[in-house]
Image (spheres, rainbow, N blue to C red):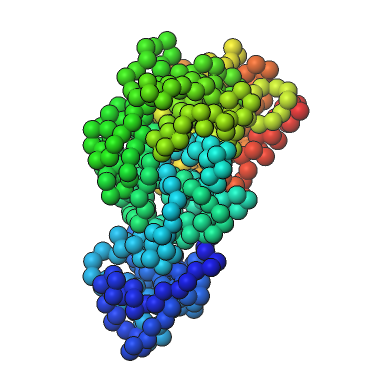
Amino acid sequence: MRPAGLNPVSLVSLEHDFGLRRVRGLAGGDPSVSGITIDGSSVVQGDLYVGLPGARHHGASFAGQAIEAGAVAILTDDAGMLLLDRGMGVPVLVGTGPLRPLVGALAASVYDTASLDLPVFAVTGTNGKTSTTHFLEALLTGMGLVPGVSSTAERRIGATVIPSKLTTPESAELHAIVARMAELGARSLVIEVSAHALTRHRVDGFTFDVAAFTNLSHDHLDDYADMDAYLAAKVELFTSARSKRAVVNLDTPAGATVVERSEVPVATIATVPVDGEAPHADWIVEVTEEKLDHTAFTIRHAVHGSLSARVPVVGRHMAANGGLAIAMLVEAGHSLSEIARTLGPNGLIDADLPARAVRIPVPTGPAVFIDSGHSPDAFEKTLSSLRRLTTGRLVAVIGANGDRDTTKRGDMGAAAALGADTVVVTDHHPRGEDPATIRRAVVDGATSARPGADVRDIADPSSAIRAAVAEANEGDIVVWMGLAGKDHRELDGTTVPFSVPDETIAALHAAGWH
């Protein structure tokens, strides 16, 4: 997704504006730059290719490939220079410091995103980012502020949709996407911001009008030393260099830390606990109804008033995310009455939530859901919500991914065993790890948390969902968590097509439910 009507900039102007040093190339040559990328496989004619150091390879190793694809210049660091052949045929530049922090500013210049006068919203947190992002999308659409959206699931503006590879794209790609969204008529932007996006400079060059924090729970400790470091990465979004104001959810203890460390004005929001007292926050979300097809709530503020709404998904946590989206819009200057006019029948926020608590549309048999949650907290919240909605059995099909945070696997198993009657542990994305080792860590966590629990180890995911559905009856609930939202599985360097919805429907049909 790149802009079509871009005015190229001169390489010499980029050299001058960003203090770059030309070390090779035609003397006085000044090619026009119409794009920028750090991905050698995505280079198009007119690009400045930036070769960055990587975990396995230095990007400069792919400079030749980039030039063949149309790169008009190469930018790298001193280490990258050692990997370049002489006589590349295009100018070669070197930065005076670390390159990654520079890429966002370069991309903003090339794609002219700084000139866009659009309200920009950001959402960060361990869980709930995607749901909040798409609730915002639905509300902004209803207001006529056509949103361009970048989420874990997809990049979308109107009918133009591309699937996401990362929660937040690399900065060069993100600026290109935003520029294209503006061309296609975007009047607002909603961007999901991961901790990695902040520590790896993926949102450099953007200042967010309203930033939101959903929660913090165990995740990504393969990349951060501990939970304090993980939280510190997210707090970066609430500095004055990144955002203008914020809305912070206090439902997890980390919210108070974000408020304390924030450099921008903060409005707080919190959810009334089940059978609990209203918490102290600027915005209060009270869940008023929980059903298999929706969750209703009322959001209140001492000054702005109250609004009753509902979200088309299961879970108190989903109501909290819907309330957060509403509060963000009010903090951006919109009134609750204006927001109320965007709601559908019975106050519905008519959002399309990719792979978030999606119910499989089979009219008979157990209620079956698929969900992309893949952390202990996500398991706990989803299962506790579903438990309140069934008088029958609750069956969870789960798995953990390879080459990712190993420390959360036991906790994922524990959350599933404590929340469900039966747990089926299967393979999701083993990647380069031994699948049996991954499953064993999850199973051990489940049986340690609830000795004697009905925990089954079924490696093949197609067989796992069939086993879960085969034993379920009318009134039971089956939920498959962690793999939804993808159209493939990653197995030891290969990508295998795989559809969670299709496999789940096939399992229901095999069990005689139609």
Residue 65 in the figure: left or right of residue 354: left
| Front-most of residues 160 and 447 | 160
The location of residue 514, given as percent across then percent down, is 76, 28
| Front-most of residues 258 and 94 | 258
From what the image shows, is residue 85 above or below residue 232?
Answer: below
The location of residue 313, given as percent across then percent down, is 57, 28
The location of residue 68, given as percent across then percent down, is 49, 78
Q: Quadrant of residue 15?
A: bottom left
The location of residue 59, given as percent across then percent down, is 37, 68
| Front-most of residues 430 and 370 | 370
List the single residue furthest toward the top: 275
Identify which residue is drawn at 52% across, 55% down.
181
Identify which residue is drawn at 30% across, 42% down.
238
Residue 255 shows up from this direction: yes
Q: Quadrant of residue 303?
A: top left
| Front-most of residues 25 and 489 | 25
Residue 355 shows up from this direction: no
List the single residue furthest toward the bottom: 27
From what the image shows, is residue 258 above or below residue 346?
Answer: below
Identify which residue is drawn at 67% across, 18% down.
473
Residue 7 in the figure: left or right of residue 202: right
Identify which residue is drawn at 48% across, 28% down.
336
